[in-house]
Image (spheres, rainbow, N blue to C red):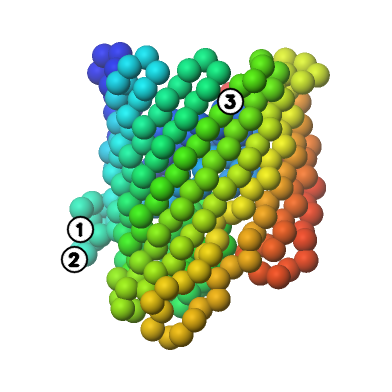
Amino acid sequence: YYYNGDKFQVYLPAAFPLWQDFVPTVSPYFEGFTGANNSLSSFGESNPIYKIGLASGGGLGFNYCLSDNLTFSAGYFGGDSFDPTEKNGLFNGEYSALGQLTFQSDKFQLGLTYANAYFNEFGGGPGDLGGNAIFDTLVGTSLARNPFGVATITNSYGASAAFELSPKFSVSAFGGFTDARAVANFGADAQIWYYGLGLAFPDLGGDGNLLGLQAGVEPYVGGYDNTPIGVLPGDKNPVSIQGFYRVAVNDNINVTPGVIALINADGLDNNTAVIGVIRTTFNF
């Protein structure tokens, strides 16, 4: 990071950038910044729009404080910025760009987000995860992550909000829509949806403890348009439900028992999977 005064912040990642490193994700009690402290799952951390186009290359991002309560964030990640070959590099290959306007007060937060991305390599057909993915960190169904198997352009729109009703209770929610269009295949189009609701009870039973309850639908393909090979089936709604109770053992160690239920996992008509979790996190 590089700071310039009180209003401007610059994010300069050399490799493997994350939107949540600098963009306010408006998920104060579930966002763990991939650090295993809050949500048990990557999907549950925050709006999946922040998982779009996470690159292995570098990029640039910034936050600018428009006022005490309003912040504008924007960034650009180059997927193959380290590759000098044709149709690659920082500005001539895969990329993702994101902009967000965030309102933050003592008790209420709201973020409105737009993201545009291009993916030039997937490998295999629709749903094949042997290559690229629109949503990273294993978020979303196979079709949502690779709807066509060919080069794809996405335009995504998201909203996230959090409201602290009291110091001991907070409600957060997010929703988003991604329009994915195949560069080949006569402009085939896929509509991808995702949304969730969370309840948080901070300091329940002791300082630093956290009870979290969340239910949501991971990114899934709701339908296809203009496909050259006939009608492609979309996904069933892949519902994810989690509950966890983080216990602060001391300032550096917490233990989190919890449970995750997955209904229609990967958008298929599968039996419900229930996963029990006990997580120990060391923070130094």
Relative to residue 280, is residue 46 drawn left or right?
left
**The disc labelled 3 sits on which kind of residue?**
Phe
Nearer the N terminus, badge 1 or badge 3? 1
Residue 2 position by quadrant? top left
Closer to us: 187 or 258? 187
Rendering coords of residue 222 (x, y %): 53, 65
Closer to us: 225 or 40? 225
Residue denoted by label 3:
163
Nearer the N terminus, badge 3 or badge 2? 2
Residue 164 position by quadrant? top right
Task: State whether residue 106 is above or below residue 97.
Answer: above
Asked which secondary structure carries label 1, the reply is loop
Rendering coords of residue 103 (x, y %): 42, 25
* Residue drawn 67% across the image and 55% down it: 239
Q: Nearer the viewer, mark 1 or mark 3?
A: 3
Q: Pointer 2: residues within 10 angstroms few (<14), some, or many (20+)?
A: few
Residue 44 position by quadrant? top right
Quadrant assignment for the C terminus: top right
Q: Pointer 1: residues within 10 angstroms few (<14), some, or many (20+)?
A: some
Nearer the N terminus, badge 1 or badge 2? 2
Give me the C-alpha separation between circle 3 and circle 2: 48 Å
Asked which secondary structure carries label 3, the reply is strand
**The disc labelled 2 sits on which kind of residue?**
Glu
Task: State whether residue 187 is above or below residue 62.
Answer: below
Quadrant assignment for the N terminus: top left
* Residue drawn 65% across the image and 37% down it: 198
Image marks 1 and 2: residues in contact by CB distance under 8 Å? yes
Residue denoted by label 1:
92
**The disc labelled 1 sits on which kind of residue?**
Asn
Residue 150 is tagged as none
Residue denoted by label 2:
86
Q: Pointer 3: residues within 10 angstroms few (<14), some, or many (20+)?
A: many
